[in-house]
Image: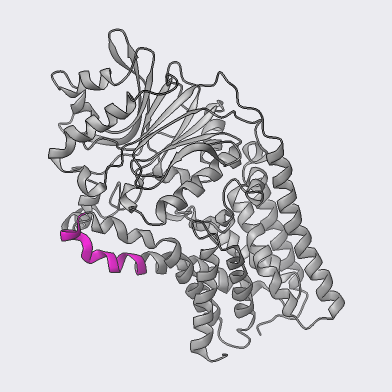
Amino acid sequence: MRRPWALRLWSLCAGLAAALAHPPFGVLPGLLGYALLMGLLDAVGERPLRSAFLRGWLAGVGYFGVGCWWIVEPFFVDAKNQAWMAPIALPLMAGGLALFWGAAGLAYRLAARNNTARVLVFAGCFALLEWLRGHVLTGFPWDLPGEAWRAGSAPSQAASLVGAYGLSWLTLALGAAPALLLDRTSRAEKAITAAVIAGFVGLLYAYGAIRISQAPTPAPGAPLIRVVQADIDQKDKWKPENLASIFETYVSLSRKAGPAHPDIVVWPEGALPAVIDELVSPGSPYGPRLRDALDPGQTLLMGANRAEARPGETDYLYFNSLIAFRREAEGLRVTAIYDKYRLVPFGEYMPLGKLATKVGFRSLVHMPDDFTAGPEPKPVTPWGVPAVQPLICYEALFPGFTRAAAVRSGLRPAWILNVSNDAWFGRTSGPLQHLNMASYRAIEEGLPIVRATPTGVSAVIDAFGRTQSGARLGLGELGVIDARLPPALRPTLYARFGDTGFALMLVLSALVIVANRFQRPMVD
């Protein structure tokens, strides 16, 4: 089993195991994949350092291959023209993201020494490279190691203290620590190591259980929110002949009779296959029908594509937006607009626009031009609606997004609204993972989050990251969620100090590395 091919296979398996710990799989013993990976990196011995890079990279290929396999699904929306790209997309994506793990493996071999404290070096190297993955080239923090715990569970509550990046450091350290039990140490030392590992795991669960037990009672007078899930397949959405039926589905669900009158109606990202300016323009038949979808005093928070004329030009800027419409006696009034700030590369804008058009990537956007990023985000305050921080699709991946917007504006929102078009990913694991990650933003901030998608998963989530009972529509379900807005908590430690806790963890790892300089290196 020490042959090169076997060691490479074990490296791949280490990443596969770690990926299976994430929802929707939830195989938490898979976290031991980090112990296997650390052991494999320790076993490099006198081999060239490139072996450490290769083992880290192969583990990353396994991890991101499982975590991101949903990337093939969008290419089957227009299978005739784009299906040929699906077999290429996953290897490119997994292999590219795995470069961060390869670099982490190399950094670990350079910095670690053969002592118990090396587990903190492992956690520091991989957590730092995961932070870089979330920031380099706009960032893609999909399935951070710390988000392996199901959002709303006891261990996930640690994100309220140190955020998803800090929880990733803790998860990496705890996952890798069992490898220390294989060191050539005495039974007493092994017993102490096992007790320390069990103690930290116990603290993680105990803190979360105590925090959840202090959940406040929902306020009976909180706004009643209706989330509309129309179950429109992405393959059918952009057919021009379907616009009328899609519009009618959203309208009929919005007006569906319920036990109480909703104050706020939510439609998902890009709900309608058209630019909203055209739909509500004078003479359009859709304007009056949109008005009639609401009762006087109701607000519609609608994900929409909108156009804005360039100053002094004949062409337009296009935005992926959230628009607040309020029904008044004389008609609809726009009371707030939020334009998406973090755009998806190759989905909402093309880094190599002309080339992307030639090879067919442009059609993934379904717009005549790239989307334009909006201004720096801040909460919006539609008339009659508690201050809300919109997160449009991809933006829900980023820890600290809501906190930064609140600091910038001086206004802490009362809730978070995540509108997303997960229909691109069909019935794969993608929408379920996206739900889990978005729920972590609630835990970090101590704020409830309402999530609306066209095909699932839509949900109302409390400030502990827990989906509210009866407030979830799964994949492929058509219907509405009527639920009171859960209460916000006092600002969490993370909401106050951001990634300071994570930075202190990295400092601890760095101090161990400095101390290691006084010991004999593992690699000559």
| Residue 152, image quadrant | top right
Give the colour scheme of this rendering: one colour
Residue 15 as seen in the image, left or right of residue 491: left
Predominant SS of the magenta segment? helix
Percent x, y of residue 322:
36, 31
Residue at the spot 31% in from the left edge and 50% down from the top edge: 424
**Above or below, 483 relative to 188:** above
Q: Answer whether residue 131 is visible to the viewer in this image.
A: yes
Residue at the spot 19% in from the left edge and 57% down from the top edge: 360
**Above or below, 177 relative to 167:** below
Outermost residue toward the top in this view: 329
- Indicate yes or no whether the magenta region holds residue 430: no
Quadrant of image for the N terminus: bottom right
Count the numbered circles shown: 0
Nearest the eye: 408 or 442: 442
Residue at the spot 27% in from the left edge and 27% down from the top edge: 251
Residue 215 as seen in the image, left or right of residue 21: right
Quadrant of image for the C terminus: bottom right
Percent x, y of residue 398:
49, 46
Residue 336 as seen in the image, left or right of residue 4: left
**Above or below, 465 relative to 338:** below
Residue at the spot 16% in from the left edge and 18% down from the top edge: 282
Span highlighted in magenta in the image: 78-91
Percent x, y of residue 508:
72, 59
Percent x, y of residue 166:
63, 52
Q: Answer whether residue 307 is visible to the viewer in this image.
A: no
